[in-house]
Amino acid sequence: MNNLCVLIMAAGKGTRMKSALPKVLQPVLDRPIIDYVIRNVLSAGISQEDLAVLVGSGGEIVESHIKEFFPNVKILWQHEQLGTGHAVKSAREFWSNYENLIVLNGDLPLMKPDSMKRLISSTENDCTVITFEAENPAAYGRIVREKNSVSIVEYKDASPEQREIHEVNAGCYAFKVKSLSRIIDSITNNNAQKEYYITDALALMNESGMTTGAFIMPESEMQGVNTHSELARVSREMRNEILLRWMNDGVRIADPDTVYISSDAELSRGVVIMPNVQIWGKTRIGEGSVIGSGSILTNAIIGENVRVIAYAVIENSTLKNNVKAGPFCYIRDNTCLEEGAFAGKFVELKNSRIGEGSKVPHLSYMGDATLGHDVNIGAGSITCNYDGENKNKTHIGDNCFIGSNTMFVAPVEVEDGATTAAGSVITQRVPENSLGVGRARQKNIADWSLRNHHHHKTTAEGDK
Ligand code: UD1
Ligand code: CA
């Protein structure tokens, strides 16, 4: 017999969100609510095998999401959502082989591992619940404390006096499985909402001589998400926590009111984040790097002493040490800028490797290209990488000098040390150390202006 398991209830409709997306998939920053809940359970030392998520309403997408990110977490189904008591009962096969069961509402993204550990170790009573003092207790279940016991009265069933109580039920319960099994079939739906309430378990336990208890945690950690305004409040709280953590670790955030950092990101000390920056996904930023205003980084790997100048968008790409990027560049799809490389103004790089010390300073598109070291790409040069069917590769060797406005019609190769003449359309290999010229020769027509009557007149009489 195993010792302890956790059940997350996530089958509810989340009616108050008025959204097609199930409540537990609503995002807090860049992750769905349920991810924070699952990660909290795992951080408290529970293994994925001992954790089940109960899905129902919108369950298919909740299931496929969880399978992708937490493949060993069990998925259980509650096909009809008849209330939280019914939810726990639907999962009976899962928990009946354990000694202790933790039940959690699926909408508590701010709960911390320490609180989870405390709940897990609350095995002295037949049931222990987490409560908090709510500033506005709204529709939360009210905690009714008696001398030696605790019970919960749902808001809609509560008397006017009970509604005055500010201590409320957070939706986290620790049960002794044996005790729960004894009373769970006695939970009825004889109440204002005609639902089976798990909260009724406490009164039933008290009646049959079992013990119940509660401990209080801060409201900031125990806020549930039932409405979009609560979602926004929880997101703000999460964002502030993350920013504070990085600032305590030596990151300078110039204006925390305007900066977003994902819970999955990792920043080193000495990093500077300018206003209006967003850092999403598994972005990593190395020591001493500066991320300029308006930049958006998603799954970016940034080395040390990198300068991301304002308004750079970087996705799924790597910038090695001492790289400079921006302002106004878009770097995406597995691009790698090697040490000391530079991507400048109005430059797009896609699935490309820019070699050490190479520069793409202005108005360029490099797609499916590899550049060696110390290449200079003249302004306006682009790869013509897509022929309507396939993406083709451009290879530019070391120490190449690419004249402004060169078009590389891929697949094509420019060998080490080669130069291209400005305005060239390069359709063939340029051999080592050669000059590739692919443009019409200039022809001058003498005295053309003098013979052009209109032009001559305008010039002579000036602007009219
Ligand atoms: C519940 C508690 C209330 C507590 C509040 C905290 C009950 C009866 N009441 O109320 O005391 O103060 O949480 O937020 O439990 N769910 C299912 N299947 C169902 C119904 C719900 O899986 O049939 C899930 C939901 O997805 C959600 C959780 O259970 O994650 C709680 O459901 P919700 O409807 O939010 O409960 P509340 O009415 O807020
Ligand atoms: Ca709730």
Image (cartoon, grey):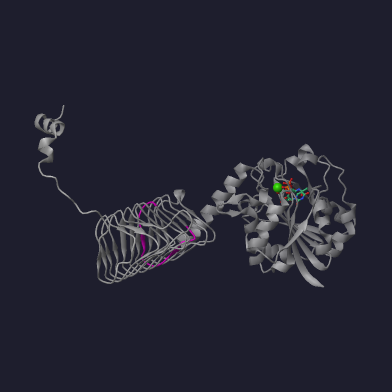
- Foreground residue, 334 or 437? 437
- Foreground residue, 86 or 359? 359
- Foreground residue, 228 or 430? 430
Judge left or right: residue 21 versus residue 360.
Answer: right
Which image quarter is the C terminus in? top left
Mostly what secondary structure, the magenta segment?
loop
**Residue 373 occupies which quadrant of the picture?**
bottom left
Asked if residue 146 shows in the view, the reply is no
**Residue 367 occupies which quadrant of the picture?**
bottom left
Relative image position of residue 433 (x, y in whole percent): 25, 71
> What residue do we see at 44% from left, 66% from top?
268
Judge left or right: residue 191 versus residue 296.
Answer: right
Relative image position of residue 448 (x, y in whole percent): 13, 40
Is residue 57 placed above or below 267 in the rendered structure?
Answer: above
> What residue do we see at 80% from left, 51% from top?
79
Number of labels in the image equals 0
Residue 294 part of the magenta-drawn span: no
**Residue 65 occupies which quadrant of the picture?**
bottom right
Relative image position of residue 59 (x, y in whole percent): 72, 52
Relative image position of residue 166 (x, y in whole percent): 69, 45
From which residue to which does the magenta span run? Answer: 298-311
Asked if residue 337 shows in the view, the reply is yes
> What residue do we see at 83% from left, 51% from top?
86
- Foreground residue, 159 or 286? 286
Which image quarter is the N terminus in? bottom right
Furthest-top residue in this view: 464
